[in-house]
Amino acid sequence: MFVLINLKAYPCDPIDIASIAAEVAANTGVRIAVAPQAADLAAVAETGVETWAQHVSSIEHGSHTGSTLAEAASRAGAEGTLLNHSEHRLRLADIDGSLRAAERAGLETIVCANNPKQIAAASRLDPDSVAVEPPELIGTGTPVSKADPDIVTDSVDAASGTPVLCGAGISTGEDLVAASDLGAEGVLLASGVAKADDPRTALESLVDPIA
Amino acid sequence: MFVLINLKAYPCDPIDIASIAAEVAANTGVRIAVAPQAADLAAVAETGVETWAQHVSSIEHGSHTGSTLAEAASRAGAEGTLLNHSEHRLRLADIDGSLRAAERAGLETIVCANNPKQIAAASRLDPDSVAVEPPELIGTGTPVSKADPDIVTDSVDAASGTPVLCGAGISTGEDLVAASDLGAEGVLLASGVAKADDPRTALESLVDPIA
Amino acid sequence: MFVLINLKAYPCDPIDIASIAAEVAANTGVRIAVAPQAADLAAVAETGVETWAQHVSSIEHGSHTGSTLAEAASRAGAEGTLLNHSEHRLRLADIDGSLRAAERAGLETIVCANNPKQIAAASRLDPDSVAVEPPELIGTGTPVSKADPDIVTDSVDAASGTPVLCGAGISTGEDLVAASDLGAEGVLLASGVAKADDPRTALESLVDPIA
Amino acid sequence: MFVLINLKAYPCDPIDIASIAAEVAANTGVRIAVAPQAADLAAVAETGVETWAQHVSSIEHGSHTGSTLAEAASRAGAEGTLLNHSEHRLRLADIDGSLRAAERAGLETIVCANNPKQIAAASRLDPDSVAVEPPELIGTGTPVSKADPDIVTDSVDAASGTPVLCGAGISTGEDLVAASDLGAEGVLLASGVAKADDPRTALESLVDPIA
């Protein structure tokens, strides 16, 4: 199972979370990555944790202001990037373009989508993985694996071979195991770790069943 | 005169340009800043050059993925931010929101606009400065001060007190002086330095008349 | 006072509301207009009511698919258009472009904005009127004139001469009078009439104090 | 073969083109439809021609200003809608949402896309048809069937059963036959008819080989 912690624009200390994630990954053997703000990529990567961008733009080198160039994210230490997160939905043509940009820059990719039909569509654009995140569950603390397990299994079917991650509402080790049992090969986490009073304990107990 | 070098998504080495800009600024006493990719902010700031973001989002801390949080740009070393560049036009409400975000994070602001009417509008949102960049001149090598000097003087009038910078087509010391003579208090540069064969010579000869 | 009824995408019969509005306008002498879906403009205009578009795009004749051409709205019978409604916020450059498009097509214009600062900005783009609609009050039934009267008076000041309409939460004749007393020259209505059980009575009682 | 004439925002008389299209369809038995501005849907439908919207929004009835409600397009006479045209690209989630909206309103759907990979993705969202339009050929007069026939055959493969239309550069009967030979079940036309000096002759000669 791959555990990706999306730090969003949370008021947490990204270096702190990154250092904890690096240690927990080393101690447990679980693959854990952290996705900070673009401006924090370099500092987060320096902790040694696997570092991901939250987004890269559908651009090549050139006259583009205020975009996130895949090559710059990679140079700062990113090894992968989320795309089309429900908080940053992209046009179909731009998912395609951002995937090509990520490929060019050597970034691994996860394309998010809301439902199995969109997962089917997204997987045809050849990302490394897809992630299903029903928007109505984001930030609720109710895991998709419990609220609507069919969404996960239907997404695994729809992805026809592309690995599926499971987002929205994952916060405990039990959720992680449930997601795995439904066929997910990873989870997207956010507030469950980034806003926890004790992020280390939160993350350790989360990965404990798969450590 | 304030000289802001926008590195856009150019295939240049941002550290290289930043180091040169820092030295030229120190040697000449001219205020020079560099605006790199968000992912490059920290590395550019480490060179000692005045560092600007190309954009910050209209968000506060919270659940926002793939946005540029003003606080993160500031933490990485940015001292200011461009907003509403013609390559990243914002909704009116988001220019307002991004200005409030920048203010919160202690970032100086320049709001770009296409023409004197939009400059008048932008200046009413209380940015630190505005910049007029006729889209049809961007990247042409023809400075706005030569192609249409009235746009600059009309923008200075329209801004009613807010300092006006002048973008689009500036590449020589002569252009800089012409912009200053028309009432501009700074210039936005991009390809003229960032894509020059010899960025140091390009920048030195550009600021020479005001050094 | 100008009363503009925005039918949004409500499940009402636009012809029915338009006919009622035309009669109430004729009977009371109050200026009342109706803004339906673009596809309903022609049928609404045929009722004889003053007809407005909800939006026109910042385009000229040419290769643009799925946009709302100002000239087509005008040909279908629109006499004016809302722009930058809080449910359809536009980029600063596009408010400017849409105003120029509306002007070309002979459409009267109202630019909406959230707060006095944005009203100041919008009014510098030379619309015929501006409308202040604090997003937090839309659809609440609490009129801005009661919840935060300063927003209206500050908007009137900020607009420096451009007529100000008042949106969000207006539903009674008392609200209308309060808005007028604060300096507003019109109101934007929506659900108060369009979703009323008896739209005629709702509209009649609303305009009664100014009839 | 289905021939859909997209009138875009051209300065043509939509009623004129629609009347011609209705007559040519009746005389030749070829299925021909016209997609005008939303504001022109009702007038175009009255000519008796099969009428399509250029776009419908991903919304249901409710508080949405300046959007194109599928139900309103249908009520005005539309029988189908284009979606995700290269001049109006949509977010993946909104293509899904607009398809559901069109379905609800009884509109037939064609989702446009740039290349076979995006065609594969779009077809997984269950539109009635997809249309491949390489952006670089739009408006060139060079038909995709000639410039890059593999794009058409690859799109037919990628669509795995969803009918494929062919856009961009189609202007002659020969192009139509070539598209058909490559597996396309229809074509999107625009300037070739809408901007022709003699639209009737242009359309008649276009459909002649399949009449």
Image (cartoon, coloured by chain):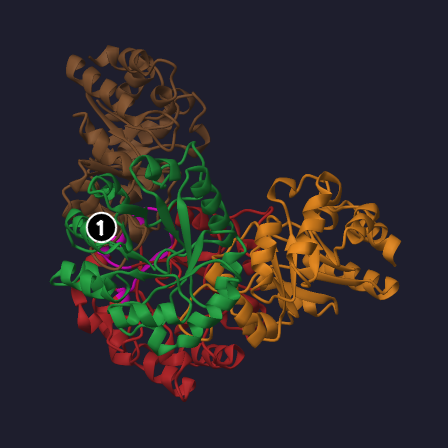
Chain colours: A red, B orange, C green, D brown
| Image position, residue D138 (x, y; %) | 42, 29
Amino acid type, residue under disc 1 in the picture:
Ala
| Image position, residue B38 (x, y; %) | 58, 63
Circle 1: is it few (<14), some (14-19), or many (20+) Cα within 10 Å?
Answer: few
Answer whether residue B68 is visible to the viewer in this image. no
Q: Is residue A53 magenta?
A: no
| Image position, residue B187 (x, y; %) | 73, 54
Image quadrant holding the C terminus of chain D, namely top left
Q: Which residue is mark 1?
A: C26
Against D30, is A14 above or below?
below
| Image position, residue B107 (x, y; %) | 62, 71
What residue appears at the point 43 percent right and 34 percent down from the top-left corner? Answer: D135
What residue appears at the point 14 percent right and 42 percent down from the top-left corner? Answer: D106
Question: How many marks overall?
Answer: 1
In depth, the one of B108 and C7 nearer the eye is: C7
- In magenta, the rendered stretch is A114-135
What residue appears at the point 50 percent right and 73 percent down from the top-left corner? Answer: A49
Q: Is residue A134 magenta?
A: yes
Left or right: residue A160 compared with residue A14: left
Answer whether residue D138 is visible to the viewer in this image. yes
Q: Chain of mark 1?
A: C
What is the secondary structure assignment of the residue under circle 1? helix
Against D38, is A192 above or below?
below
